[in-house]
Image: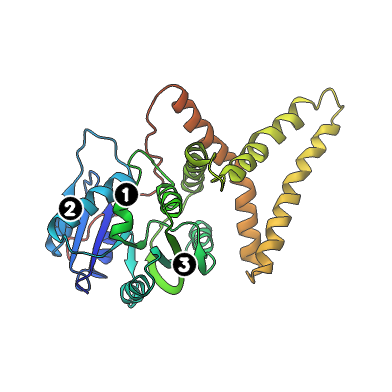
Amino acid sequence: MKQIGLVAIGRNEGDRLGACLRSAIVQVALVVYVDSGSTDGSLELARSLGADTVELDLSIPFTAARARNEGFARLRQLEPDIEFVQFVDGDCEIVGGWLQTAQQELAARPELAAVCGRRREKFPEATAYNRLCDMEWDTPVGDAKACGGDSMMRTSAFEQVGGFNPTLIAGEEPELCVRLRQNGWKIERLDAEMTLHDAQMTRFDQWWKRSQRAGHAYAEGSWLHGNTPERHWVKDTISIWFWGGVLPVIALSTAWFTQGWSLWLLAGYPVLTYRIYRRMQQQNLPAKDAALYATSCAIGRFPQLQGQIQFHQRRLLGQRSSLIEYKTSKPVNSAR
């Protein structure tokens, strides 16, 4: 498929990167791997598999958005006639048949800027946190407002809007899709398997940091595009502030004056959890999974608020946000 190029990004993904590159390298015109300061031999592994590589300048803060932009620029430099680019994270494997399916959809529908499919967690039963990731990625099929880090994009559309915003530490894909849709493009979620993701989330603190990063993304996204007609992520941001801060502060700070009656406000959390649980069951999610997802959503408001506060604090101080990382490194297997 000479019309497709692939850009993979990663940092210390180890053997996960090897699986990622092997899943696609013989199917596309060129694979570009962009490395963000790995110390585990990822660059050497990528080169041994035939990928072109880009090492990001260590003096400039890392972001996935910046890495994808530089990978795309390298791809266009080496293969200027590429029509479509598949972006993929280094901890994901491309599912067989996806690249052809995505290319055919983009070729048949010139109004589409990007298509994505079903990203699945590779080991969903390993931990509750992995299972939560898998449920989160099960988005509705059809017209979509956004895609994730794994998607195939039309190069002309990507270039028209200037690519990803390189300063964003999270939420760069939905932010790009806002600008694409503002320019008349559409995004489609296809009913097709796309990638297998190896989250390797085994600890509560990893889940907390991932939720914190999501809160940061909601804050920055609403700050950038909250005044547009669609009010990008404004509702989500208000919800995070209410459940993560306003409600508990009112309930606890007025408990003495109300002789404890204000503490009944905290009953809103089980109500919120139950409402999410019922909504997920209506989507045919098993009761156990629906309960896990609902509980995570309710508790997640607190780390999300932490991420929101972090964004606005640094914004007011004129500081650039730094990465919020939750992944652990996995060494490269030398016996590849």
From the image, state whether disc 3 or disc 1 is nearer to you. 1
Residue appearing at x 73%, y 56% in the figure: 274
**Amino acid carrying mark 3 in the image:** Arg
Q: Which residue has dot 3 on it?
A: 189
Badge 2 element: helix
Q: Residues within 10 Å of mark 1 (few under 14, many from 20)?
A: many
Return the x and y of residue 222 as percentages of the image width and height. 52, 40
Q: For this view, does 288 lie left or right of residue 147? A: right
Whether residue 4 is situated above or below residue 267 in the rendered picture = below
Return the x and y of residue 230 as percentages of the image width and height. 56, 48
Q: Which residue has dot 1 on it?
A: 163
Badge 1 element: loop
Q: Residues within 10 Å of mark 2 (few under 14, many from 20)?
A: some
Label 2 close to label 1 by CB (< 8 Å): no
Badge 3 element: strand
Q: Which residue has dot 2 on it?
A: 74
**Amino acid carrying mark 2 in the image:** Arg
From the image, state whether disc 2 or disc 1 is nearer to you. 1
Return the x and y of residue 184 as percentages of the image width and height. 43, 56
Q: How far is disc 3 from disc 1 in space, using C-alphas?
A: 20 Å
